[in-house]
Amino acid sequence: MANLYSKIHRLKAQGWTWDEFLQQISLIYPPGIDEKTLYGLYRHPHRKASRHIRQILEQLHDQCFPSPFPSSAEALIGLYNRQVNNPKQPDLTADQMALSAYLTEACQYGPLLYRARLYWLSANIQLDQLSVFRKNGKHEQLNLAQQQGIKDYQQSLSLLEEAILTTKTGASIDVFTLYKLRQNMLACYLNALSPEQRSESKTLLEYLKVCDFINSTKQVLESEPYQWLLARNGLRFSSLTQNAQDCQWFYRALCTANKAFKNLNYSPENTPSIASSVEFHWAIENALDLSDF
C-alpha cells in the first residue's frame, strides 16, 4: 500500500472518529497535525504531504498494521528502497549486484517468512532493472532479469503459502500482501514491454488470464474500496484485454474510491491521467460511456 491516501483511509476505516484519529497522531508526535491538513489528505489522492507529515502517518499505519515479516528482513528492504529513491545515489547498479549476490545465499536459510521476504527483495531488484534494460536495448539482460524476477516472486509466494498452512505466524499474512506479490509478478511481464507493445503481447495477455489478476483485484477492492491504485490497475489490464464489462466495473470502482476520477484528465500524485496513458485508450474508446458514471 504505497500511496498515503489509501493508508489514511485504512486507518480511518478502523472506526476512529476524527478526534480519535488526531489523538493517535499526537501519541506519535505530541504537537499533532492540523485537522484540515489530515482531512485534505483523506479527501484528495493528489494532495501531497510534507515529508514530516508523511513519516508521522506512515509510522501510525505501521503500528496499526504491522508487517508480518521479520524486522531484520524489513530493515533490509527499507535500506534498499532508500537507495533506489535517492537521486544522489552514485552507482545503484553496483549496489544492486552486490545485494543480489548476498541474497542468493541468504535466501536459503532462516524461518519461512524471513526467506519469503528476502526472495521478494531479490525479485524487486530484478523488477527495478527491467525498464532500464528495455530503454537501453539490453535485450539479453532484460530477459534474464525478467525470468529471475518471476522465479524469485514465485518462490516467495510458495514460501508464504507454506507458512500460512504450517505456522502460527502465517496467519498474519493478509489478502493484500498476497495480492501485492502477485501484482509484482505481473509487473515483470508488463515492464519488460514498452506501453505500445503491451496490448499485442500474447505472453502478457495469456498470463493475465492464468493468474486471475482481475478477480483477485476485485476481491481486494470489495474489502478496501478506497484503493484507487488497484482500481486503476484493474481498469488498465481490462483495457489491455479488451473486456468492456470489466472496464466498466473498475471505472466505477475508481470513481467510488474518489469521485475526482470522473475526470479522465485527473492526475493523482506521481501517476499520469487515464486520458494521457495509451494503455487506457481501448477502454475510453470502446467501453466507457462517461454519462453513466
Image (spheres, grey):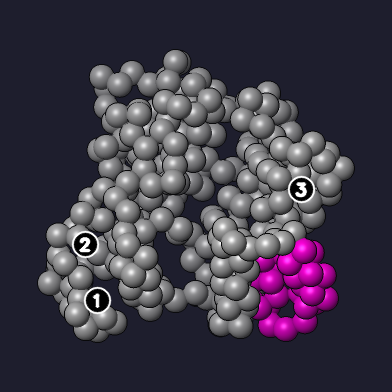
- Name the residue beneath numbered marker 3: 146
Give, as a three-letter code, the residue at label 2. Answer: Leu
Give the CA separation, mark 3 to mark 2. Answer: 40 Å
Q: Is residue 185 above or below residue 66?
A: above
Q: Amino acid at mark 1?
A: Ile
- Above or below residue 205? Residue 282 is above
Picture quadrant of residue 267 = top left
Q: Amino acid at mark 3?
A: Gln
Q: Residue at x 16, y 67 (%)?
A: 34
Count of marks placed on residues: 3
Q: Earlier in the sequence, mark 2 or mark 1?
A: 1
Q: Quadrant of residue 57?
A: bottom left
| Picture disc at residue 25 | 1
Q: Position of residue 278 (x, y in %)?
A: 53, 25
Quadrant for the C terminus, please. Answer: top left
Mark 2, Cα crowd under 10 Å, few <14 / some 14-19 / many 20+, is some
- Using the numbered discs, state the Cα–Cα distance from disc 2 to disc 1 in whole angstroms: 10 Å
**Contact (Cβ within 8 Å) of mark 2 with mark 1:** yes
The residue that label 2 is drawn on is 38
Which residue is found at the position 45% from the left and 27% from the top?
A: 276
Element type at marker 2?
helix
From which residue to which does the magenta span run? 94-122
Say which element carries label 1: helix
Q: Is residue 165 left or right of residue 254?
A: right
Q: CA distance from mark 1 to mark 3?
A: 41 Å
Residue at 41% from the left image edge and 56% from the top image edge? 3
